[in-house]
Image: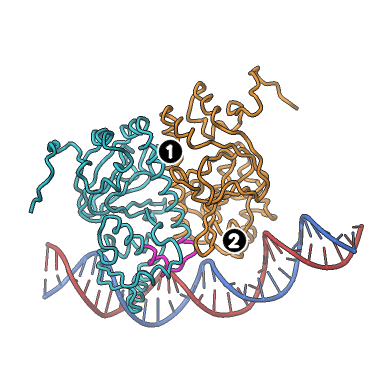
Chain colours: A cyan, B orange, C blue, D red
Amino acid sequence: MAQTLPFRPVPSPLKASCHTCSLSNLCLPLAIDETDLESLEDIVQQGRIYKRGEHIFDQSTPFRSCFAVRSGSVKTSIVSEDGEEQITGFFLPGELIGLDSMGGDYYACTARALERTSICEFPVQKLEELTTRLPDLQHHMYHLMSQEIQHSHQLNMLLSKNTAEERVAALLLSLSSRLQRRRLSGTRFSLPMARNDIANFLGLAVETVSRVFTRFQTQGVIKARGREVELLDLAALQGVTRELSRQVCP
Amino acid sequence: MAQTLPFRPVPSPLKASCHTCSLSNLCLPLAIDETDLESLEDIVQQGRIYKRGEHIFDQSTPFRSCFAVRSGSVKTSIVSEDGEEQITGFFLPGELIGLDSMGGDYYACTARALERTSICEFPVQKLEELTTRLPDLQHHMYHLMSQEIQHSHQLNMLLSKNTAEERVAALLLSLSSRLQRRRLSGTRFSLPMARNDIANFLGLAVETVSRVFTRFQTQGVIKARGREVELLDLAALQGVTRELSRQVCP
DNA sequence: CGTGTGCTTGATGCGCGTCAATCGGTGTGG
DNA sequence: CCACACCGATTGACGCGCATCAAGCACACG
């Protein structure tokens, strides 16, 4: 089972191991070179496990850390005064959570694990110190945050101009391409979120999402059984969304 | 007319004068103290004038600078492949443009002056250098960018859950509070943008925006003649949007 | 085996987009 | 200085897409 590994002094179990993490080319490490990676490992707290549905933080938690998904998945949401919830993002392995809270005193949203999920933690105080010392890392932080702004703007366009079918297609394609980045199948995967979450995120009713799924299925564009989906005709899906194939979500 | 000023050596005309700018408590200077302000003044290029409708940058412009509105107003927008335009923000004096492009090679949107507008320019290369030296300024940049993410998320919620009336009310209240920050009237002002822009931004048809305006007017909630508006009943407007009184826009 | 929860399917109604016409203000040319 | 054209804003009539309400269905769990 255990495959042979190159001889590297085994890090102490609580010390980070970004070096050996398969996500290092997606996550923060990608911004910095080998020698500086140790600085990052010094501040990261590695791989705590959250159970399905468990809170990682919410809007009343003082903002102390950003988080990176290592395995599993997370949804973030905000709630308005009248109790309406709006899901603001789904996060897959290698993606960073908490950028919308940088510089604030409390988290700007609530984050919750969608399934059994492992998460690394970056204390912001140390992270900010580190980014003053490593200009490349600072640049990368700016880049990540600006991308989150762009994705949200793309989502705004999706919500204000596109039909239910276009929205669902865009989400499926976004998930597909994000899985492919990790060398996973982009055509056959399991949705981490419920129909309810999809509907909330896309500004639709659950029933509408369900109808779109069955319509796509009868058209032979996808095959879906519960959360298992297979994208049979990517071109058709991309045709539905004339644009924003992959840049719609975080 | 000219009021007596404290004797301060007059800065050379092209050298920045954040010191004397009335917006210094809204703009970047608010993050740093008196002594460091000179560093910021060294890199800023002050107050170029743009005519109504003039481009400040667009999506094919290499990203070199962030901009701060000094007077007037600006709209930013993105266009999808099929040519659909989506306005992503309206910017008033003291607000920073280009945060969605930080870390990229090109601007992520197009910016255009809505009226005769004066704009200060911050070259990003120098700005990034400066933020590594001034941790408070770096922190402030993170803060501004995270706020832009939050505002966009709020807008997502507005677009996916709220009616036309709620959206228009939210925009009016947002403008109102942003004007008040500058000690201007929050109840009587002139809209910098056309109905068309409002509609586009809020994901509505122009006709719908127009109808909402007249409906509000017959209810005695506002008074509007063209772009001149007066908010007669703030409480009623806030009642329409049960939430997000001021945080909906940049 | 019953209960709950998430998903699907059908019937109905409403909000808002669309199309079309008119109005008002502004700029232009005779 | 007026007549015309043009553009943004308004108002009305109509239809469609999706929300809503209401049942059924599938699967997991105690």
Q: Residue A160: say if magenta.
A: yes
Query: Looking at this view, is A6 or B29 the one in front?
Result: A6
The reply to whether residue A85 is in sight is no
Q: Secondary structure at mark 1?
A: helix
Name the subunit of mark 2.
B
Mark 2 or mark 1, which is nearer the start of the sequence?
1
The reply to whether residue A237 is in sight is yes
Query: Looking at this view, is B37 or B163 the one in front?
Result: B37
Name the subunit of mark 1.
B
- The residue under the point 64% across, 38% down is B48
Q: In the rendered structure, which segment of residues is drawn in magenta?
A: A158-171
Q: Is residue A203 left or right of residue A224?
A: right
Please say if B199 is above or below C8.
above
**Residue kind at label 2, given as amino acid type:** Val
Q: Position of residue B199 (x, y in %)?
A: 57, 59
Q: Is residue A105 left or right of residue A119?
A: right
Q: Which disc is residue B143 wearing?
A: 1
Question: What quarter of the picture does the N terminus of chain A occupy?
Answer: bottom left
**Residue kind at label 1, given as amino acid type:** His
Query: Looking at this view, is A223 or B65 the one in front?
Result: B65
